[in-house]
Image (cartoon, rainbow, N blue to C red):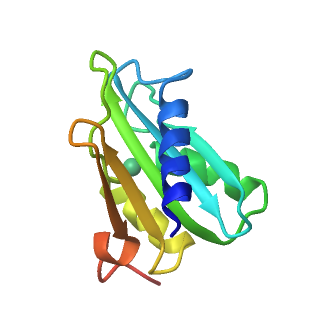
Amino acid sequence: MDNELILKLISEAKTVANQNFCCKYSNFTVGAALLCEDGTIYTGFNIENHGIQSICAERSTFAKALTEGQKEFKAIAVVARNLNEAKFKKTLPCGYCRQFLSEYTTPDFKIYTYDEIEDKIYSYTIAELLPESFNL
Ligand SMILES: [Zn+2]
């Protein structure tokens, strides 16, 4: 994928992670930017509540896109930082999100994350992050 577009996704993920965060339990803000096949970008962040039902940034972002009628997706950028630290660090989808992503994307769907300390972009496919995924 075009490097400029990858940088745009990372930038939008950082912006949403820095605004209006709802991570009062972990103080770990996660932002995601999802690129749809038609070029639309949706953003979202992790939304925590007391208990185990918190919503990860990846799934909150997909929920926005899916409810707007999007069905085909190309890539997602995920970034995160502790609120008491300035820089974002490499962050990848949790196991639950990997399963979710695998059900709404194709095996070549790309996941990008950015480590601001290393100034390095990491890139994976969902098939790499969740090989042999569960299917009905
Ligand atoms: Zn997750």
Q: Residue at x 38, y 72 (%)?
A: 125
Viewer-nearest residue: 117 or 105: 117
Image position of 124 with respect to 28: above or below = below
Q: Is residue 54 visible?
A: no
Q: Residue at x 53, y 31 (%)?
A: 15
Q: Position of residue 124 (x, y in %)?
A: 34, 68
Q: Residue at x 47, y 35 (%)?
A: 14
Q: Position of residue 81 (x, y in %)?
A: 32, 30
Q: Is residue 116 left or right of residue 18?
A: left
Q: Is residue 101 left or right of residue 65?
A: left
Q: How many marks?
A: 0
Q: Is residue 62 left or right of residue 126?
A: right
Q: Position of residue 63 (x, y in %)?
A: 63, 51
Q: Is residue 64 visible?
A: yes
Q: Position of residue 7 (x, y in %)?
A: 49, 50
Image position of 92 with respect to 20: above or below = below
Q: Residue at x 29, y 79 (%)?
A: 131
Viewer-nearest residue: 126 or 9: 9
Image position of 43 with respect to 136: above or below = above
Q: Residue furthest left?
A: 118
> Where on the picture, by quarter, is residue 83?
top left
